[in-house]
Image: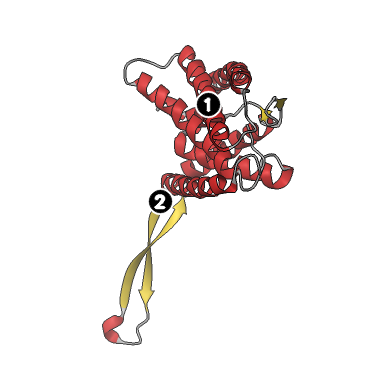
Amino acid sequence: MHLPDGFINNNVAGPLLGAAGAFVGVAAHRVQQSVMRKVAVVKQKLATFPQSSGAETAYRSTLTKSGQQFLWRMVTVGSFIFMIQLVDTPLVTGTPGHMLGSALAALVLGPWAAMVVMAGVLVTQAGLLGDGGIVALGINFLSIGLLPIWLAWGIIRTIRKKQSVRPLHIFGATLLSVIGAAIFVAAIMQFDTTLFGSHWASFIGTHVIIGIAEGGVTLLIIRTLKKKGVPIELYK
């Protein structure tokens, strides 16, 4: 799923990179708001002039204890996703296929934190391992760190409005998130390049298999975390 530089035209990759940066900025701001709180700080004024003496109140942001714990969960989830994405399956299109971890991040951390985590994973992989291009970070983020996250989250939240979330729902949301991401990448490549050709069926079919495996892994991890009492956003 990680596209290298050159697979799509830079005239397309450039704007997608800008869009991805904007989405990550919004997500990071939302996460910051959730883990920080403003604390009043009283400052004494200098008594150089009698009329200016006294105290004034200022505010500073500080990391809450629950916010610190949440950030550690983000790091843990990100580290796990980083590892599972290293297990690649060669595809006929020349790009690697692998589990995404997007649905797992979304359901455990919530969509905004999941976006930040996936952005960190993708940047690290591209910068340190050469897994995915630098200019292609835009489309890679949109296909791994945005679309599948909100697809899985949207499916689960819609179900929660009508009934309790069951294991089959988690499995199905994960599977559909992977298929949706694969269709998005296939559409972009078909639109912008002749490299994709007639490989649609093979590309999507491979990701259906990957999605089934990822659905099982996601379900297993969420059930384990729930048993251990770890806070999970999908149940809040």
Residue 189 visible from this viewpoint: yes
Q: In the rendered image, which quarter is residue 60 located in?
A: bottom left
Say how the picture is coloured: secondary structure
Q: In the rendered image, which quarter is residue 208 located in?
A: top right
Kind of residue sitting beneath label 1: Ile
Disc 1: CA contacts within 10 A as few (<14), some (14-19) or many (>=20):
some
Answer left or right for 113 relative to 43. right
Q: Nearer the viewer, residue 15 or 197?
A: 197
Disc 2: CA contacts within 10 A as few (<14), some (14-19) or many (>=20):
some
Residue 188: x and y in percent read 54, 34
Q: Which mark is residue 191?
A: none
Camera-side mark, 2 or 1: 1
What residue did someone put label 1 on?
183
Answer left or right for 130 relative to 103. right
| Residue occupying image coordinates x 49% and y 39% | 113
Residue 231 visible from this viewpoint: no
* Secondary structure found at label 1: helix
Q: Find the residue positioned furthest to the left.
A: 51
What residue did someone put label 2 on?
37
| Residue occupying image coordinates x 32% and y 72% | 55
* Secondary structure found at label 2: strand
Answer left or right for 39 relative to 213. left
